[in-house]
Amino acid sequence: MKNWKRMLAAGLILTVAFGVLIGCAPKGAAKPQVTLMIKLPPLTVANADTDIKDAYEILKQAGQEFAAQYANADVTVKVVKFAYTEEDDYITDCFDTEDAADVLFEGYFNMAGYIHTGRVVPLDDIITEDMRSDVDDASWEMSQVNGKTYMLPYYSLQNTLCFKKKLFRQCGLDEYIGEEGTIQSWTLDEWEHILSTLSEKLPKMSYPMLMYAKNDQGDTHIMTLLRSRGSEFFDKNGRFHINTPEGVAALQWIADCYKKGYFPAGCENMEINDCNTLFLNNQLAIYMTNSATAINLDSDTMGFVNFPSEDGAGYNTSFVTGFEVFDNGDAAKLEAAKAFVRYFYDNEELMNYAQVGIPASKATTERVSEHIFMQEAYSANAVNTVDFTANNPNWRGVRDVFYPHIHDLLAGNRTPKEVAAAIDADCNAAIENGWANSKLHK
């Protein structure tokens, strides 16, 4: 009898223990505690139904809403905004710490490099067939490596140049202003006439066109100028190919423009924000913009033009802004991070903020088309878009070594030929290093 009681008691203990192990805990058992770290640089959004223009604010709102309805864990969402110049401090330097980003909202040209760290997870498991068909193939291709999707596209931005109509009129350049709401293209002869006229007729301490070489902010625009004399920029393997007659000619043009006074004095020691200040102060006639910043410009006073090209059709660049998810070694955090991104894409109100550019979602574009700034003009101008990364890894490394050579060119330390050879050597070394160290998430 005593043995029977002992066996029954032991069985009951085992049953209770087994129930705990398989999750048959009493109702009200504590959920996992998860803190999601969402990071982003300064980015704008737009929604005609609200006054919110800062992506930081909309991500905070989305985080609160997501946490309130997420059932698999008690989630606290922290949203952190960092300056573009502090990206390394907030992303790579935070790897393997409690401050590591779980979700990143940013433009592709920086995000692409993180894919090759092995920390960014593929998101194909949260992409439905409806989502797949709702986004154009070009955006998906930009977001994929080896057929896997590592970034969810949210909107695309098209980079062009912009100019002050008032300054053009003051200098007798009315014929180059064009119709409102259009994106122009000027021939190389027209570019020379416009720049020389502006240089001659603008007031002292005012300049025709932007130029800068203090840091890597804005290198995309300088790279686009290097195509102006017919350079294809990349070779067939996606490597830099500037040391050609066309590439050297473009560098020579930049050096000559500086000598002629077409660029701000001391531009080798300026950054793009310095040019922005000059532009806002009416001391710079031609600046750069994209379909996010252009929305804040007065089209009555601003005109838009492509970067110069040999054939006169002009160039622009375009890149996707979207979401990445990082695996920081915590399964519950990773599950919640993916769920947050999926929640964002399932919410029409949140998706409507993509109208700051061209929404990646066709359904969103259809809903908000009347509120998208110059949608028809930007869509028509897509035929003049050039690829500015060739899907290379370590683009941050490329940018780190590119701008010092433009500084040397503007400072007169090296000839255009020497600069072309140095750009090819250093940028391609950065790309090769990127491929050598590339690893994808397993």
Image (cartoon, helix red, strand yellow):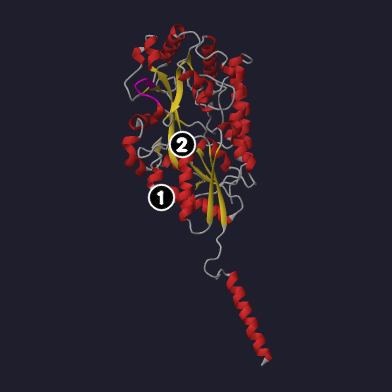
Check contact, mark 1 vs mark 2: CB within 8 A: no
Q: Is residue 233 left or right of residue 162?
A: right
Residue ID at (60%, 54%):
330
> Could you say whether the residue bearing mark 1 is in a helix, strand or loop?
loop
Q: Is residue 381 magenta?
A: no
Residue 334, image x, y percentages: 55, 52
Of labels 1 and 2, earlier in sequence is 2
Q: From this viewpoint, is residue 124 visible? A: no
Residue 346: numbered disc? 1
- Main SS of the magenta part reads loop
Q: CA distance from mark 1 to mark 2?
A: 20 Å
Residue 92: numbered disc? none
Residue 139, image x, y percentages: 44, 40
> Could you say whether the residue bearing mark 2 is in a helix, strand or loop?
loop
Residue ID at (47%, 52%):
126
User: Which sits in the foreground, 90 or 189?
Assistant: 90
Residue position marked by numbered label 2 in the rendering = 54
Q: Is residue 302 magenta?
A: yes
Label 2 CA crowd tier, 10 Å (few <14, some 14–19, many 20+): some
Q: Quadrant of residue 167?
A: top left
Whether 96 is drawn above or below 231: the answer is below
User: Which sits in the foreground, 252 or 26?
Assistant: 26
| Amino acid identity at mark 2 | Asp
Q: Is residue 133 left or right of residue 13?
A: left
Residue 362, image x, y percentages: 36, 42
| Amino acid identity at mark 1 | Asp
Q: Which residues are magenta?
A: 297-303
Q: In which quadrant of the rendered image does the N terminus lie?
A: bottom right
Q: Nearer the viewer, mark 1 or mark 2?
A: 2
